[in-house]
Amino acid sequence: MKPLTKRRIALGSLFFFIGLCFASWAARIPDIQSKFDLSEGQLGTLLLFLPIGSMIGLPIAGWSVHHYGSRKVILVGSFAYAMSLPLIGLSPSTWILIPVLILFGLLGNIMNIALNTQALDLEDQMGKSILASFHGLWSMAGFTGAGIGAGMIFLELSPFIHFMIVMGISTLIVLFAQRFVIQEKSNDEAGGLVLKRPDDLLLRIGLIAFLGMMAEGCMFDWSGVYFKKVVMTDPSLVALGYVAFMGAMASGRFVSDRFIHRFGKVTILRASGILLFSGLTISVLFPTILTATLGFLMVGFGVASVIPVAYSIAGRSKLYSPGVALALVSTISFFGFLLGPPLIGFIADLFNLKISFALIALNGLGIALLATIRKQVFFPQPEIK
């Protein structure tokens, strides 16, 4: 097996590992709620601390990857991330759980930036687009983690035992992968300050990622509610929209690289925006079980490529090192992920859920326009080929 192929398999396993850890935590949130007897409002407040940790981790990730290289960050961060998971199940009170969730979110985002930096370096060495397939493995890990979680709940194992088992699996994955993680090409000439204003290219890419992540966050949190209250489907089929969206997003990421290589990043971004807009529009105008499911499938395929393409373009910035550029774009896009779900609820309270989804559909048009207008200035050919 070729060295680059071995490195690709190793990096793919690490993307799978961080997705598995996150999905394992998500699968036991109801148990955490029961353990501490939390109301929905209290649980919502508690869950905010994980994205707070993620936001704290962004500048740390950009700085550490720039100064120490993604290899060192991955080797240290992967073990730390795996070991932080059981601490969630071990926490005896919410006051202990809060800093643990902050740590879990912080380490997760540091790993996200470091792994994407490493993947971009491998992409350059292989001379073809491969980043989307790594994100597809993260999505596939979500299904795997949910399945393992369901099995653990069926066996009536506590979250701590569940998380210890996942930590053991994760440790084996990291031990296998670590020897294939190499130091990426140095980029010392690029700027290392994370809290600088992004240049025009990174700002444009950040806005595209912002719109994509906002739509993604809304679909994660509101798909089931939409099928229940707007589509008014049978209770047994409420999760169908979410499954359709997640399945399309995961499978779309596995085939995206081939389309990116053939048609180019700008064309894929435009097509992604159009799919997102069309899918949500169909779901709003024709809220039946068949058309809404089809629409959610289109949305899944639409958002599948947005973040991988945005990261791929950002990581080749001429002004910033890959780690810093990714942290800048991630910072902008992450606000979209946080803003989207509560925005849906606020608009639904003022009007209705269909209006909320119709407005999020406009994100797709925004992505297509941002990828098209002044393409020569914001997407120069050396940056996207």
Image (cartoon, rainbow, N blue to C red):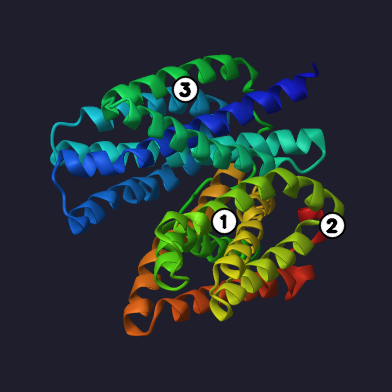
Is the residue marked by circle 3 packed among few (<14), some (14-19), or many (20+) residues within 10 Å? many
The quarter of the picture where residue 282 lies is bottom right
- At x 57%, y 81%, the residue is 285
Q: Is residue 343 above or below residue 82?
A: below
Q: Position of residue 360 (x, y in %)?
A: 51, 73
| Alpha carbon distance from label 1 to label 3 | 27 Å
Q: Give the residue at mark 2.
A: 263
Disc 1 element: helix
Q: Give the residue at mark 1.
A: 245
- At x 53%, y 35%, the residue is 141
Give amino acid for label 3.
Ser
Q: Give the residue at mark 3.
A: 170
- At x 56%, y 62%, the residue is 212
Which sits earlier in the primary sequence, circle 3 or circle 2? 3
Q: Is residue 345 above or below residue 202?
A: below
Disc 2 element: helix
Which sits earlier in the primary sequence, circle 1 or circle 3? 3
